[in-house]
Image: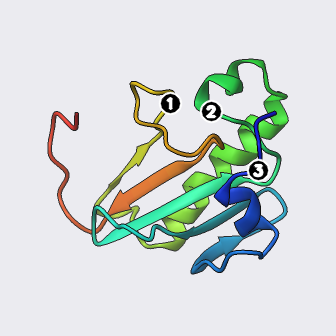
């Protein structure tokens, strides 16, 4: 596992965050540099470094994380008009924190292509 990240510190309440949802599997909090009117990050409490790690993860952990992402989007009221979920993976994917995290973006119409 990689060194301690900002998300590890947020989970331990060493760094404050604006939490929007938490259960036994995930923590969701507002992004400090939002790219949409609603921009929330969702992290699993069982650490994985990137989306690529899901291929070898326990399916129960993967399911709990993905269900957590969907539940956060619903709790934010994004189901009716839609939203985007983004996973940045690796250097070329612009992953800046070595801890898997989903970006939930909503509150406006998204553009395509995104990259």
Q: Nearer the viewer, residue 83 or 100?
A: 100
The earlier-in-sequence mark between 3 and 1 is 3
How far apart marks 1 and 2 lie (CA) works out to 6 Å
Q: Determine whether 60 is above or below 92 in the image.
A: below
How far apart marks 2 and 3 lie (CA) works out to 14 Å
Percent across and percent down for residue 92 are 39, 24
Q: Which mark is residue 50?
A: 2
Percent across and percent down for residue 103 are 46, 52
How far apart marks 3 and 1 lie (CA) works out to 18 Å
Residue at 83% across, 47% down: 46
The earlier-in-sequence mark between 2 and 3 is 3
Q: Determine whether 34 is above or below 85 in the image.
A: below
Check the picture and name the quadrant holding the N terminus: top right
Q: Which mark is residue 4?
A: 3
Q: Which mark is residue 10?
A: none
The earlier-in-sequence mark between 1 and 2 is 2
Q: Hey, which residue is sitting farthest front in the picture?
A: 3
Near mark 2 (Cα within 10 A), the count class, few <14, some 14-19 or many ≥20, is some
Residue at 78% across, 44% down: 47
Left or right of 24: which side holds 48?
A: left
Residue at 15% across, 38% down: 112
* CB-based contact (under 8 Å), mark 2 and mark 3: no
Quarter of the figure with residue 59: top right
Q: Nearer the viewer, residue 60 or 87?
A: 87
Left or right of 69: which side holds 84?
A: left
Check the picture and name the quadrant holding the C terminus: top left
* CB-based contact (under 8 Å), mark 1 and mark 2: yes
Q: Secondary structure at mark 2?
A: loop
Q: Which residue is the site of mark 1?
A: 89
Q: Determine whether 73 is above or below 95 in the image.
A: below
């Amino acid at each position: 596992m990689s060194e301690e990240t900002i998300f590890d510190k947020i989970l331990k309440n060493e760094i404050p965050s604006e939490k929007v949802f938490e259960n036994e599997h995930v923590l969701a909090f507002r992004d400090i540099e939002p790219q949409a009117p609603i921009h929330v990050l969702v992290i699993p409490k069982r650490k994985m470094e990137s989306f690529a790690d899901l291929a070898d993860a326990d399916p129960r952990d993967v399911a709990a994380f993905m269900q957590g992402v969907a539940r956060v989007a619903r709790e934010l009221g994004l189901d009716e008009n839609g939203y985007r979920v983004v996973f940045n993976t690796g250097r070329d994917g612009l992953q800046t924190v070595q801890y898997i995290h989903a970006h939930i973006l909503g509150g406006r119409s998204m553009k395509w292509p995104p990259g």
